[in-house]
Amino acid sequence: MSYMKKQRARSDSEKQYRKEKLQESAKKLFSFHGYRGTTIGMITDDAGLSPASFYLYFGSKLEMYRTLNNMGIDILQTMITDALTAAPAGSNAKIRAIAGAYFRFFIQEREYYDITAILHLGHREFFADLSMVPELEERTKTLLSVMATIISEGIKTGEFTQVDPWKTAVTLWGMIDGVLILEVKHSTGFTGVKIDELVDQMIELMLRGISEK
């Protein structure tokens, strides 16, 4: 490798390293302080970089937030795909696998969960740039379509009763999210029921609801 190529490779590697440092710091701070409570200065201080360096990679704080949102969805999609690959045959088992993967995402990637759930950012602000809307809508629809397809297969095999697959998929996803939001709000502690027990109970109830003939 020539000297110029070595220098270019080193420069590209350094740029990628700095970008990843900024992303890691932003992910941590957005999750802990929220979108509005986090400044670009806080992100660069945590990353050990100058404020000016932020704009070499991101046009704004909102762009950074959206980037992390997409990264989080990538991780969730991979976890769901892996869970479905390992799941036993049958639609019931596959729905359990999806719910379980989402719960693991919540536990193992909590910072990304907070960002993908847009918990710290107003809906209007997040979608201020309308060019972002179609991409996010399609990514969400893709996840829901996987569940709707499994429900349709379950209806054909007789595992599930006759329901609207799309509406049921949206409803089930909302039920999963609802239980997780209880934990986010620290509303599960006083009940004496652990979050994993609530998730298991929710999965049992929702599957029983679409399995009863």
Image (tube, rainbow, N blue to C red):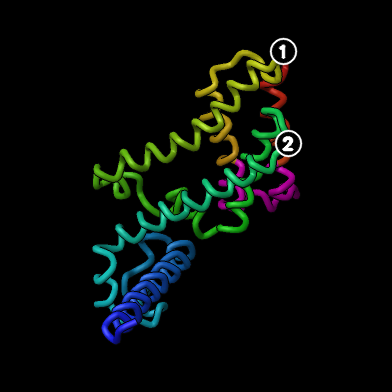
**On the image, which quarter does residue 164 sit in?**
top right
- The percent position of residue 19, horizontal first and vertical second, equals 36, 71
**On the image, which quarter does residue 197 sit in?**
top right
| Residue in the picture at 26% in, 83% down | 4
Quarter of the image for the C terminus: give it.
top right
Give the mark nearest the N terminus, 2 or 1.
Answer: 2
**SS for callout 2:** loop
C-alpha gap between disc 2 and disc 1: 23 Å
Q: Is residue 24 left or right of residue 8?
A: right
- The percent position of residue 65, horizontal first and vertical second, equals 36, 58
Q: Which residue is mark 1?
A: 213
Determine contact: label 2, label 1, CB under 8 Å: no
Q: Is 79 covered by the magenta stretch?
A: no
Q: Is residue 138 placed above or below 128 in the rendered structure? A: above
- The percent position of residue 64, horizontal first and vertical second, equals 34, 61
- The percent position of residue 80, horizontal first and vertical second, equals 58, 44
| Residue in the picture at 54% in, 21% down | 165
- As rendered, which of 44 and 85 lies closer to the eye? 85
Q: Amino acid at mark 1?
A: Lys
**SS for callout 1:** loop
Q: Is residue 153 placed above or below 36 in the rendered structure? A: above
Q: Which mark is residue 88?
A: 2
Q: Which residues are magenta?
A: 179-199
Q: Is residue 206 placed above or below 34 in the rendered structure? A: above
Q: Is residue 199 left or right of residue 119?
A: right
Q: Is 181 covered by the magenta stretch?
A: yes
